[in-house]
Image: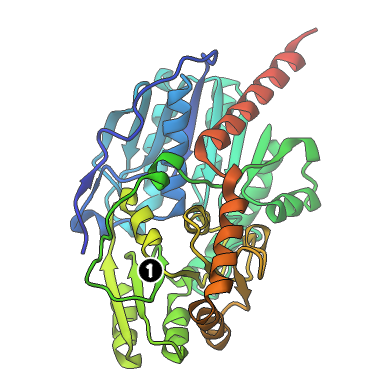
Amino acid sequence: MTRPFCSAEPRETGRDAGPDSFGVLRFTSVFEPLCLSPDWAAYDPIGGMQTHTAELTRCLDRMGIRQTVFTSRLAGPAGRRPYGSGAVVVRTGLRVPVLRQVWAPPALARALGPQGAADVVHAHSGEDLAVLPAAWLAAVRHRCPLVVTLHSSLRHTVRGTSPRAAVLRLLGGPVERRVLAAADAVIALTPSAARRLCADGMPLDRVHVIPSGFDPELFAAARPDPFPDVPHPRVAYVGRLAAQKGVAVLLEAFARCRVPATLLIVGDGPQRAALERRARGLGGEVRFTGFIPHVEVPAVLRHADVLVLPSVYEELGSVLVEAMAVGLPVVAGRVGGVPDLVRDGVNGLLVAPKDPAAFADAIDRVLTDPGLAGRLGAGARETVRDYAWPALAERVAAVYRQVLSGRSASARP
């Protein structure tokens, strides 16, 4: 059930008065879709990085920071469009997923010209080979500081045996290391990622830990159940249907659960057809909803009984933060930086990755023990009190001010 949702008029378009008057040029291979529809979702399923970059853009716009965001055109038509009060999103490239990287050359050509002039360049690096070199060249061209947010390290985070994963590690790993070494500041999503950067030789004073967050107004609003016909208890998964996310493991786990329940899979992606076939073979009550607008995600989570994130590899998993914001118990694989957020038995349950039996046991524990579920939910809310996007955006802006101040100081006689 994919519902059209157009974001030409993004949320929170009002601007707060503030002292910031600098401009930021940002590169990200993915961004919030211009219009969420079945036609679009087939090209670029939305995930945590799309939400992260959009929420940050909205918050910085409210602070009066000028922004030009360069991204691929998979999630909207090519061209330049206003976003909020003072930001601009420029989409380039082709609407062909296998040619995703070709968005970067035309974006870079624009970024190197007068319209790309900025005080800071900020790269959002995920599973993409083009963002880091493009951002570095733009920073060199405009003689301004470079900030990198590492959403997924090509050297340390990406796992798997697919040809794509091998290419990302082989080609992207060295590029990542060289560009990060030249960056004025690197933002890691978790302390674990920050420790890896420092172990690689990155000076401690250039590494900042700023996680993904949630919009407190969006998640505080009361919304009706988007799936009133789905019975409880509900085991929910929200995210992309891609190999990295381990949804096949979740299907195996759900088939082993002792407690009768409904598995609600909210999302889309390249593995959807195969996963639907697998679910039919395993049996059980499994619902694939397709994508829904992000503004409806809080209602999905609020009306679920447990969220499961079975990722094979993951830097953080922003849906975990969002689930915890509504007090929903979470079950997640012990991978990447997830243990930095989820403390086993305190605010969620951690299990071995790729282990259907372990996931099934954890799901059954939450569904059969209301006391445990209540304690985990309360612990989750307490954990993410400091994960609200406005506060996180302030921390990103502080990094901008720091690198600008550092460049100014180094230029003085």
* Depicted 321 relative to depicted 220: above or below: below
Q: Is residue 231 left or right of residue 196?
A: left
* Depicted 131 relative to depicted 165: above or below: above
**Scheme of image coloration:** rainbow
Q: Position of residue 193 (x, y in %)?
A: 68, 53
Q: Quarter of the image for the C terminus: give it.
A: top right
| Residue 397 image-quadrant placement | top right
Query: Is residue 402 something that shows in the picture?
Result: yes
Q: Position of residue 287 (x, y in %)?
A: 28, 76
Total marks shown come to 1
Q: Is residue 334 left or right of residue 89?
A: right
Foreground residue among 272 and 350: 350
* Depicted 253 relative to depicted 201: above or below: below
Query: Is residue 179 something that shows in the picture?
Result: no
Q: Amino acid at mark 1?
A: Leu
Q: Quarter of the image for the N terminus: give it.
A: bottom left
Badge 1 crowding class, 10 Å Cα cut-off, few under 14, some 14 to 19, many 20 or more, is: many
Q: Secondary structure at mark 1?
A: loop
Q: Position of residue 190 (x, y in %)?
A: 66, 52
The residue singled out by tag 1 in the image is 241
At a point 46% along the width and 41% down the height, the residue shown is: 216
At a point 67% along the width and 25% down the height, the residue shown is: 403
At a point 67% along the width and 64% down the height, the residue shown is: 343
Q: Position of residue 395 (x, y in %)?
A: 61, 32
Q: Is residue 118 left or right of residue 39?
A: right
Q: Is residue 89 left or right of residue 206?
A: left
Foreground residue among 346 and 103: 346
